[in-house]
Amino acid sequence: MIIFGFIILIICSALCLYRIGRGPTASDRSVAIDILGIIVVAFCVLLYFKTGDGFYLIVAIAWALLSFIGALALAKFLEDKGFDE
């Protein structure tokens, strides 16, 4: 069952990479990059279930936090606002 999850996540990541490359607007690319971050977190969680090593959960939490901060920064940049506003 975990292998099926890996296959689904690989397909989803390929579709996100396609949207990043062919996205018509910057906001489409931004959403695809954010979804790719969520897919990386899902990979880490599946690796945790497969191996039982807690290190993968720590990486998943750290990646989720950094992805959230990056999405906020990119949204501010796309709105042409400074980081102090």
Image (cartoon, rainbow, N blue to C red):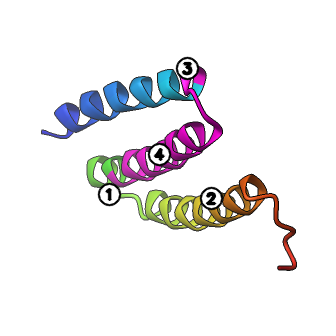
User: Is disc 1 placed on a helix, strand or loop?
Assistant: loop
Mark 4 lies on residue: 40
Mark closer to the chain start, 1 or 3: 3
Instruction: Kindly report the distance in space between the C-alpha atoms of the residues bearing marks 2 and 1.
Output: 30 Å
Report x, y in % for residue 32.
50, 39
Which quadrant: the N terminus? top left
Going by the numbered disc 3, the residue's amino acid type is Arg
Q: What stretch is highlighted in magenta?
A: 21-45
Say which of 39 and 80 sits in front: 80
Mark closer to the chain start, 2 or 1: 1
In the rendered image, residue 57 lying in the magenta stretch gets the answer no
How many numbered marks have been drawn onto this rendered protein structure?
4
Query: In terms of image quadrants, where is residue 71?
Result: bottom right
Q: What is the number of the mark on residue 52?
A: 1
Closest to the camera, between mark 2 and mark 3, is 3
Mark closer to the chain start, 3 or 4: 3
- For this view, does 42 lie left or right of residue 33? left
Instruction: Kindly report the distance in space between the C-alpha atoms of the residues bearing marks 3 and 4.
Output: 21 Å
Say which of 70 and 45 sits in front: 70
Q: What is the number of the mark on residue 22?
A: 3
Residue visible at 27% across and 54% down? 49
Residue visible at 37% across and 50% down? 42
Q: What is the number of the mark on residue 71?
A: 2
Circle 2 residues within 10 Å: few <14, some 14–19, many ≥20: some
